Amino acid sequence: MIFSMIGELSHAKGVHVLVESILKMSFIQGVEYHFVGSSTNDGADAFPLVEDLCKRRGDVKYHGYIDDMKNYLGGVNVVISCSIEQEALPTTLIEAIASGCLICTTMTGGAKEIVNVSPGSFVIEPNSISICQVLNEIIKLDEDAIQNLTNGNYKAACQYFTLDGQIQKISMLYKRFC
């Protein structure tokens, strides 16, 4: 099973929280943790944490930036988004759902609005205890349960991201605020 954090390796993306969580996890045969993305140059870079984690644990891999995300996501089971700050539109999560991945994301704005509608999405508090709990919960799932959740994710996303679905959401917002 592959868990993957995809995005900028920064404090705002919660990389430090995920690193702390992985350090608390027991080594489990067949479970890997991947980091995909580039480091930042703004002083909030979390790459040194990821680099150190890779040295300390054989089940952690760093891939850097990947051009062919569709191909990469085909081999990933769970995409983790640990952002501690609000995001606009986390397109990685949309791509992950379309690729049949389970989603584990924090309750920050942007991400939760996308995944709240999906049965194969786990929305959690941005702390290592919550992350460890959900990772352990996912690891215990059997293949059928994972397949059912990913199918549910995909179906929910197909309904949510249709033009009719978006018109319905905009109409609800209009009625609520006007």
Image (cartoon, grey):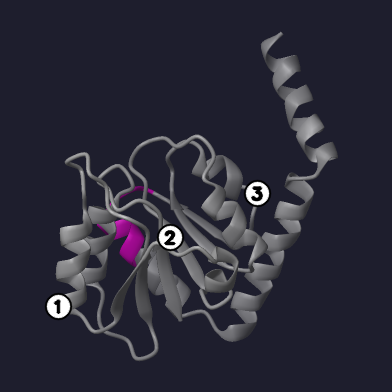
Q: Which numbered disc flags the more N-terminal residue, 3 or 2?
A: 2
The residue carrying mark 3 is: 117
Q: Distance from label 3 to label 2 (Cα)?
A: 17 Å
Question: Which residues are the magenta region?
Answer: 125-132
Q: Residue 67, percent across and down? A: 50, 63
The residue carrying mark 1 is: 56
- Residue at 59 percent across and 85 percent down: it is 143
Q: Which numbered disc flags the more N-terminal residue, 2 or 1?
A: 1
Circles 3 and 2: CB distance less than 8 Å?
A: no
Above or below for 25 versus 66: below
Q: Distance from label 1 to label 3 (Cα)?
A: 37 Å
Q: Is residue 4 magenta?
A: no
Identity, as a three-letter code, of the amino acid under mark 2:
Ile
Furthest-right residue in this view:
164
The residue carrying mark 2 is: 80
The image quadrant that residue 164 belongs to is top right
Q: Which numbered disc flags the more N-terminal residue, 1 or 3?
A: 1
